[in-house]
Amino acid sequence: MPDTSKSSIITDPSAPPEWIKPHPGEMLREEYLAPLTMSASELARQLGVPANRVTAILNGDRSVSADTAWRLARFWNTSPDYWMNLQKTHDLSKAWIENGSQIERDVTPRNQENEAA
């Protein structure tokens, strides 16, 4: 069901995205590491993970796992849900942009009104 925000713009959280949302690695790089001039290696050391894990996330080649989300949350004083939601939003938008038209062709919405009781 659509919600109306304070700005009176109607939004529907289930509406298909119009573009691929940023990968969490982009957010991590631009909003967290860059202002501190922190390297991937330093973050990896602080998180207790291999440097290639952080580098792959920063490059958008690896998803943020639940374990990494907990580590990022603890280090940056955020929540693991924050990191997982960034990943989920990216993944869902990418899947729709890449496969949405095929999904619409392949899947017919269930119509409960036409089903026998």
Image: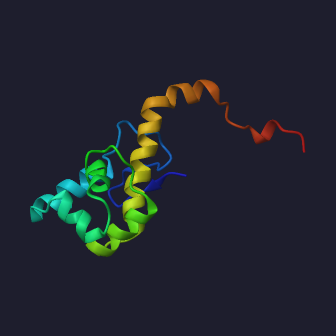
Residue 17 lies, with reference to residue 31, above or below; the image says above
**Left or right: where 21 falls relative to 55:** right
Closer to the camera in the image, 23 or 12 = 23
Question: Which residue appears at 39% of the width and 55% of the height?
Answer: 64
Count the labels in the image. Answer: 0
In the displayed structure image, the side of residue 62 where residue 13 appears, left or right = right
For residue 38, above or below residue 30:
below
Q: Position of residue 41 (x, y in %)?
A: 19, 60
| Residue farthest along the front direction in this orientation | 50
Q: Provide residue 20's location: percent of width, then percent of height.
A: 35, 39
Q: What kind of colouring is applied to the model shown?
A: rainbow
Task: Residue at 32%, 54% (x, y): give it.
Answer: 53
Quick one: which residue is furthest to the right in this view? Answer: 117
In front: 81, or 108? 81
Residue 52 locus on image (x, y percent): 28, 52
Q: Is residue 117 above or below residue 3?
A: above
Q: Residue at x 39, y 50 (%)?
A: 63
Residue 51 pos. (x, y %): 26, 57
Is residue 37 left or right of 20 when viewed as pictured? left
Residue drawn 20% across the image and 57% down it: 40
Q: Quadrant of the C terminus?
A: top right
